[in-house]
């Protein structure tokens, strides 16, 4: 099955060459120019990756991102924008974007980031096996299926959220440094803001708390983060 990419961009000098490049790479591509239709298309399903401009004519791209995540979309979202400020970058990651490219950008760089994001978001096909027993805390991270469980309830997570939690869970009780999270979840050549780690961890904390998971992600100041069980869990 081909990978479906939704391009949300109103600039007709950027979108057509971007669409052609993606199609040449073998992706199934749709192009919309406004936020409202983008939200509707994402909600209808069968979208694997969204390339999202912020400066749309009908609504801010950040709101498109927020509504997509609130609606349960767990695919990749890469923000494409002329806004290069730190505030926009952090806000974009905080509402659920996985990556961020400031315009103008090289198509080769965009393709590399898209491939990496899609590769991480694809479950590993393995032979059927009995479900693993829940961890003592009630939190189970199924790396092969890329699913998160708290008791019998599944917790929806974006690609980056899953990668961060899987790494923290692998080292449960130990500190995982910011440098390691950045290198393994994003890219060792990432030159963006390190605030992306904080934004992703913040969303994870909220989701785990809402799911009633008896764990917490602790910030170890100046070092990184640690996933630990609540006392008595």
Image: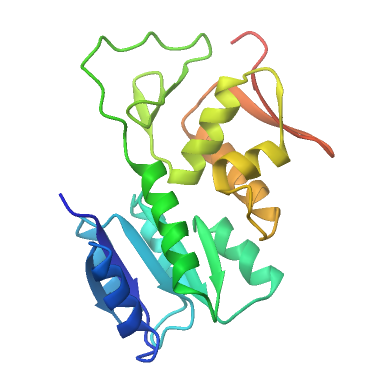
Q: Nearer the viewer, residue 116 or 121?
A: 116
Q: Which of 163 and 200 is in front in this view?
A: 163
- Give the percent coordinates (x, y) of residue 68: 37, 60
Vertical relation: 212 (above or below) 231:
below
The quarter of the image holding the C terminus is top right
Q: Is residue 203 visible to the viewer in this orientation of the structure?
A: no
- Give the percent coordinates (x, y) of residue 69: 40, 55
Q: Looking at the image, which residue is at 39% across and 62% down?
A: 67
- Give the percent coordinates (x, y) of residue 199: 62, 51
- Give the percent coordinates (x, y) of residue 42: 27, 62
Q: Is residue 231 visible to the viewer in this orientation of the structure?
A: yes
Left or right: 159 as drawn, with respect to 33:
right
Left or right: 222 as drawn, with respect to 168:
right
Vertical relation: 83 (above or below) 167:
below
Q: Quadrant of residue 150?
A: top left
Vertical relation: 119 (above or below) 23:
above
Q: In which quarter of the image is residue 103?
A: bottom right
Q: In which quarter of the image is residue 178?
A: top right
Task: Kindly give the residue lying farthest to the right in the view shown.
Answer: 222
Q: Looking at the image, which residue is at 34% across and 20% down?
A: 152
Query: How is colour applied across the structure in the image?
Result: rainbow
Q: Looking at the image, which residue is at 50% across and 45% down?
A: 160
Left or right: 7 as drawn, with respect to 178:
left
Number of on-image labels: 0
Q: Looking at the image, which residue is at 54% across and 81% down?
A: 104
């Amino acid at each position: 099955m081909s990978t479906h990419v939704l391009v949300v961009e109103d600039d007709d000098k950027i979108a057509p060459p971007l669409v052609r490049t993606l199609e040449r790479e073998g992706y199934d591509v749709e192009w919309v120019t406004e936020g409202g239709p983008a939200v509707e298309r994402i909600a209808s399903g069968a979208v694997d990756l969204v390339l999202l401009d912020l400066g749309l004519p009908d609504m801010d791209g950040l709101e498109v991102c927020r509504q997509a995540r609130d609606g349960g979309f767990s695919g990749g979202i890469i923000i494409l924008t002329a806004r290069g400020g730190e505030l926009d970058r952090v806000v974009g990651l905080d509402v659920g974007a996985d990556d961020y490219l400031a315009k103008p950008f090289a198509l080769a760089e965009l393709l590399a980031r898209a491939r990496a994001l899609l590769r991480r978001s694809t479950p590993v096909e393995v032979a059927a096996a009995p479900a693993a027993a829940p961890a003592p805390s009630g939190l189970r991270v199924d790396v092969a299926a890329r699913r998160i469980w708290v008791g019998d309830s599944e917790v929806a997570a974006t690609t980056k959220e899953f990668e961060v939690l899987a790494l923290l869970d692998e080292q449960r009780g130990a500190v995982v440094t910011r440098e390691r999270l950045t290198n393994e979840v994003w890219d060792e050549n990432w030159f963006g803001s390190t605030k992306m780690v904080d934004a992703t961890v913040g969303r994870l904390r909220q989701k785990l708390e809402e799911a009633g998971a008896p764990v917490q992600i602790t910030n170890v100041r100046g070092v990184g983060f640690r996933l630990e069980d609540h006392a008595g869990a």
